[in-house]
Image (tube, rainbow, N blue to C red):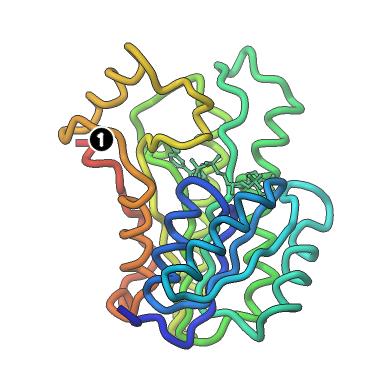
């Protein structure tokens, strides 16, 4: 499939987990993919190699997010390898401290907001002059912004709630340029983000949240992103897509 032939995509956090699956899928669909990473260069190289092995084109882009100058660093690395952008996927994120409000540490709260909210805001701000008309922005949020309520995820859910608002505001602004902006909200997906906690009774409970009785896979999320990034998604904008196997039903 080459629906994205001639397009350039940037996937933040494209080196591992959900971002890796998105990068691989967009690469398979014909896009040249900038695989962004923060610290794990080996994982980014693996993802680039996997895309190339499947016949696609990709390159790695390094920038630590959530620190001063993060967006500038990212786009300087991108510009060294590419001329303009068609698809931006704001995927990089952290779970942060799992604690109810009374136990949340101010510094870790700031860190979650810096990586999950401030960074995609600034990355998108700097993307706009590079993003061609007819382009796509997909923000990876979480089903937690609409429930089920998990009080220990309050910082994380708040950080993603702001991203949901970014989607709606930007969709309105960028519509005249035929640029669509959408949110994809996964339920629980078994990735490194959970640091091995998806086992035993916790796993059974999390699986039971979906009528499909399973966790999501990175590919479940990537396929939804691929639709929004494709020409088929051209008239869908400002929307929030629950890709959680029906967790909210
Ligand atoms: P993951 O496996 O932990 O991968 C995170 C990715 O983001 C890595 O590529 C990592 O790069 C990058 N990243 C993290 N912090 C960074 C920073 N400060 N600077 C630069 N890069 C950074 O996570 P995941 O589960 O795939 O999650 C991807 C997205 O989906 C996140 O936004 C997450 O909130 C969202 N999500 C996940 C789930 C889930 O259950 N897994 C559910 C809902 C939503 P390095 O390794 O190089 O640092």
Q: Is residue 83 above or below residue 203?
A: below
Left or right: 177, with 229 as reference point: right
Which image quarter: residue 62?
bottom right
Which percent across, then down, holds residue 84? 63, 84
Residue extending furthest toward the right: 68
Left or right: 40, with 231 as reference point:
right
The percent coordinates of residue 72 (x first, y second) are 79, 65
Q: How many marks?
A: 1
Q: Residues within 10 Å of mark 1 (few under 14, many from 20)?
A: many
**Mark 1 C-beta closer than 8 Å to ligand 1:** no
Badge 1 element: loop
When the figure is inspected, residue 130 is found, relative to residue 60, above or below; the finding is: below
Residue occupying image coordinates x 57% and y 55%: 46
Along the horizontal axis of the image, is 69 left or right of 34?
A: right
Residue at image point 27% right, 18% down: 204
Q: Residue 50 at x, y = what percent?
A: 49, 61
Of residues 153 and 84, the one nearer the viewer is: 84
Q: Residue at x 49, y 83 (%)?
A: 7
31 left or right of 39? Answer: left
Residue 196 or residue 147, whichever sits in front: 196
Note whether 143 is above or below 19 in the view shown.
above
Residue 189: percent from left, percent from top: 38, 38
Point out the residue furthest to the left here.
211
**Ligand 1 sits in which quadrant?**
top right
Residue 235, placed above or below residue 228: below
Quadrant where the image shows the C terminus:
top left
Where, quadrant-wise, is the N terminus in this rendering? Answer: bottom left
Q: Which residue is mark 1?
A: 247
* Residue at 68% in and 53% down: 119
């Amino acid at each position: 499939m080459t629906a994205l032939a001639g397009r350039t995509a940037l996937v933040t956090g494209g080196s591992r987990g959900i971002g890796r699956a998105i990068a691989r899928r967009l690469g398979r669909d014909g896009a040249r993919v900038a695989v962004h990473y923060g610290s794990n260069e080996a994982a980014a190289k693996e993802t680039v190699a996997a895309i190339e092995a499947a016949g696609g084109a990709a390159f790695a882009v390094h920038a630590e997010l959530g620190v001063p100058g993060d967006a500038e660093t990212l786009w300087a690395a991108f510009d060294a390898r590419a001329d303009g952008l068609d698809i931006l996927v704001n995927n990089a994120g952290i779970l942060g401290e799992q604690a109810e409000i009374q136990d949340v540490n101010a510094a870790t709260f700031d860190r979650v907001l810096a990586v999950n909210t401030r960074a995609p805001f600034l990355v998108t701000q700097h993307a706009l002059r590079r993003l061609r008309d007819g382009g796509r922005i997909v923000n990876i949020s979480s089903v937690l912004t609409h429930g089920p309520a998990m009080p220990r995820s309050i910082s994380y859910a708040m950080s993603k709630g702001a991203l949901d608002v970014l989607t709606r505001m930007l969709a309105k602004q960028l519509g005249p340029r035929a640029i669509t902006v959408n949110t994809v909200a996964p339920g629980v997906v078994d990735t490194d983000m959970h640091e091995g906690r998806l086992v035993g009774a916790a796993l059974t409970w999390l699986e039971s949240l979906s009528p499909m009785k399973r966790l999501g896979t990175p590919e479940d999320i990537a396929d939804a992103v691929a639709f929004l990034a494709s020409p088929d998604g051209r008239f869908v904008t400002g929307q929030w897509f629950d890709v959680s196997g029906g967790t909210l039903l």
